[in-house]
């Protein structure tokens, strides 16, 4: 006799190949050149490595600009110089980013930051200073990034602004001079620093304590106003205008429950045109009425959330993306004069026409009365009752899940699982009270929120309580380990991707340039110097013998954030305790899997693992050439 699960699985749509879900996009992330003449985008080459491609607007002369050999290019942007793009690349996931320029006419590629073991951080570009870029480099001291000015014409690197050691963010004014900065403070908070002229000492404009968030977003064109996004004197992060002469602040945009998320700025006038708040979905508040007709026209082109990816400096053409929950990202060019939109392409045409699941915003009440928000996705074609389920936990943890197409979610739903993504306390976007409710609650109330989510799923009849797995990356990997050690009877299995197992060794081994963040970590997680026993009590490593359910761990060997030792040590402890664990180590990856070969291999391993313990469907692994996975 068939079980309920088998009956349900037979009604699911056809199996979607992992290659479609986790392979490279066909074309993605288009950007318009500042003069509007060219369109750049990312696409794979003949070896399936992501490169930057270029086409002349209005023509079909697409050509490949770059020749990355292995890892693929994921981040790039136009300069205002006219003929140069810049892309970022590290080595096998070590996050020591280099900035490379590529000339679109000659296709000459230049490493602008050719320093071994150094990390480059783009600080700023400005259309009025087209031949320069400001870059942070930890060249003099690995613990801090000073600012350098790089000449895009000849590659000359010139020292610009010294970091006293605690500055973690810089902001240039309309004259392309570093005039504002964010510095961390010993209490776990931060200082807003400002200087009126370059020869002045930094002045303290405002101190934010450890329970407040704030940063400078933009200088006005005349330099008299500094726009801030900050939560002081309110629960949420608001957009504020600070008059630098009088020190008076004016609220420009706010929401009582949600933080400011996105800010749309006119690049030449520096006028703030719109602000978004991410609620269940993104909602825009228009501040500059001249773009109201554009937003009206754009909103009618395609369903889903729209975003303005780039615009030419004449402000005649915008590139608009449309994010849906059940299909690819669609990219359009929008002509402001005619109000017409033209489809460029979607990032993954093979998703079109597939039966993908919809993502529904949900909420529930945690055991202490706090409202927790999240997203529920259930398989297409079957009733959402007594389903095998995956609790998919986001990383950060100071981040949040959002609505929209997610390859992991669609993969799990297609295999027959309900998927719940939870913005547990400590997640961002919901105001500082919600964020601070997660302080010192790693492995405690933050985990209670996840267990309460499981109980909610069971009470609603959505999930089979015997078939719920927990899975996630980074903090989500830690939550997986906590789930199997602290609450060993709740979950049927766990999948940990680059998750820390010991908070002490995690904090001891942070990259040197995270040194200024130690006080914040001490406030939000626990103090490494004075609270080792407390941190130990929140570390799954020391409870490995409690594990009852099967565990799969995946790790990048070059991860600078969560070192390989974090996975090695818990695998060893679990094996020593005689408990079930599988371990997949990727020798050329870091904090996550950039190469498609490795993604395809890992998700094949995870799919078989979940099918074994949750009884969902799986696509056989098959041959995956080029992956670096080592299975233990």
Image (tube, grey):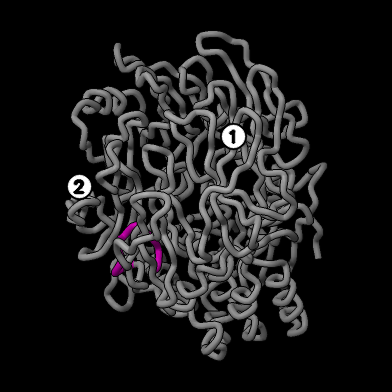
* Residue at point 60%, 64% (across, down): 143
Asked whether, in this view, residue 470 is left or right of residue 186, the answer is right
Examine the rendering and report whether any part of residue 586 can be seen.
Answer: yes
Q: Which mark is residue 151?
A: 1
Mark 1 Cα-neighbour bin, 10 Å: few <14, some 14–19, many ≥20? some
Residue 414, percent across and down? 55, 45
- Secondary structure beneath label 1: strand
Residue 438, percent across and down? 39, 73
Q: Quadrant of the C terminus?
A: bottom right
Magenta stretch secondary structure, dominant: loop
The quadrant in which residue 111 appears is top right
Asked whether, in this view, residue 609 is left or right of residue 279, the answer is right
Asked whether, in this view, residue 407 is left or right of residue 620, the answer is left
Query: Distance from label 1 to label 2 (Cα)?
Result: 36 Å
The quadrant in which residue 158 appears is top right
The quadrant in which residue 215 appears is bottom left
Nearer the observer: mark 1 or 2; the answer is 1
Report the front residue among 510 and 123.
Answer: 123
Report the front residue among 371 and 425.
Answer: 425
- Residue 53 to residue 554: above or below: above
Q: Quadrant of the N terminus?
A: bottom right
* Residue at point 80%, 61% (across, down): 631
* Residue at point 58%, 48% (across, down): 159
**For marks 1 and 2 on the same chain, the one whose residue lies earlier in the sequence:** 1
The residue where tag 2 is placed is: 252
Q: Residue furthest front?
A: 199
Report the front residue among 300 and 234.
Answer: 234
Residue 307, percent across and down? 38, 34
Q: Which residues are magenta?
A: 426-434
* Residue at point 55%, 42% (across, down): 149
Residue 317, percent across and down? 38, 19
């Amino acid at each position: 006799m068939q079980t309920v699960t088998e009956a349900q699985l037979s009604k699911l749509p056809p199996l979607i190949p992992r290659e479609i879900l986790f392979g490279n996009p066909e074309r993605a992330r288009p950007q318009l050149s500042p003069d509007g003449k060219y369109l750049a985008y990312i696409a794979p080459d003949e070896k399936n490595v992501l490169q930057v491609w270029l086409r002349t607007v209005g023509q079909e002369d697409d050509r490949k600009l770059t020749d990355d050999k292995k890892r693929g290019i994921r981040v790039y942007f136009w300069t205002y110089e006219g003929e140069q793009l810049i892309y970022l690349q590290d080595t096998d996931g070590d996050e020591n980013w280099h900035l490379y320029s590529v000339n679109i006419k000659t296709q000459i590629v230049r490493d602008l930051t050719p320093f071994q073991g150094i990390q480059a951080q783009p600080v700023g570009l400005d259309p009025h200073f087209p031949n320069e870029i400001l870059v942070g480099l930890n060249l003099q001291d690995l613990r801090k990034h000073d600012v350098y000015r790089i000449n895009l014409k000849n590659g000359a690197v010139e020292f610009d602004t010294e970091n006293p050691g605690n500055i973690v963010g810089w902001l240039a004014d309309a004259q392309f001079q570093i005039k504002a900065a964010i510095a961390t403070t010993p209490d776990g908070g931060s200082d807003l620093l400002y200087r009126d002229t370059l020869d002045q000492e930094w002045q303290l404009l405002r101190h934010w304590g450890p329970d407040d968030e704030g940063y400078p977003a933009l200088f006005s064109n005349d330099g008299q106003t500094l726009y801030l996004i900050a939560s002081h004197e309110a629960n949420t992060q608001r957009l504020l205008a600070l008059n630098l002469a009088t020190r008076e602040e004016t609220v420009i945009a706010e929401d009582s429950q949600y933080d400011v998320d996105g800010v749309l700025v006119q690049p030449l006038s520096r006028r703030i045109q719109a602000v978004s708040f991410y609620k269940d979905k993104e909602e825009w508040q228009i501040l500059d009425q001249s773009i109201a007709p554009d937003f009206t026209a754009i909103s009618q082109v395609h369903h889903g959330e729209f975003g303005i990816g780039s615009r030419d400096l004449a402000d005649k053409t915008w590139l608009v993306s449309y994010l849906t929950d059940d299909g690819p990202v669609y990219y359009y060019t929008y002509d402001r004069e005619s109000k017409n939109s033209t489809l460029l392409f979607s990032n993954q045409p093979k998703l079109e026409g597939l039966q993908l699941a919809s993502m529904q915003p949900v909420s529930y009440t945690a055991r202490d009365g706090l409202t927790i928000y999240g997203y529920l996705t259930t398989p297409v074609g079957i009733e959402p009752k007594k389903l095998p389920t995956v609790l998919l936990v986001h990383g950060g943890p100071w981040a949040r899940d959002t609505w929209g197409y997610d390859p992991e979610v669609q993969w799990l739903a297609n295999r027959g699982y309900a998927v719940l993504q939870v913005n547990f306390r400590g997640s961002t976007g919901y105001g500082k009270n919600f964020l601070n409710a997660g302080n010192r609650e790693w492995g405690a109330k933050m985990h209670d929120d996840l267990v309460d989510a499981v109980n909610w799923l069971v009470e609603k009849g959505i999930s089979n309580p015997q078939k719920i797995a927990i899975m996630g990356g980074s903090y989500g990997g830690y939550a997986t380990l906590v789930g199997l050690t602290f609450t060993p009877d709740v979950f049927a299995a766990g999948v940990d991707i680059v998750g820390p197992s010991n908070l002490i060794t995690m904090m001891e081994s942070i990259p040197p340039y995270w040194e200024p963040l130690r006080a914040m970590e001490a406030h939000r997680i626990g103090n490494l110097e004075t609270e080792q026993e407390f941190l130990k009590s929140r570390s799954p490593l020391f409870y490995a013998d409690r594990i009852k359910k099967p565990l799969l761990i995946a790790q990048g060997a070059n991860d600078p954030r969560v070192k390989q030792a974090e996975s090695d040590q818990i695998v060893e402890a679990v094996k020593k305790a005689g408990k079930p664990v599988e371990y997949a180590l990727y020798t050329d990856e870091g904090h996550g899997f950039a190469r498609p070969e490795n993604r395809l291999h890992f998700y094949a391993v995870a799919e078989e693992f979940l099918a074994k313990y949750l009884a969902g469907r799986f696509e056989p692994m098959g041959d995956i050439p080029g992956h670096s996975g080592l299975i233990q």
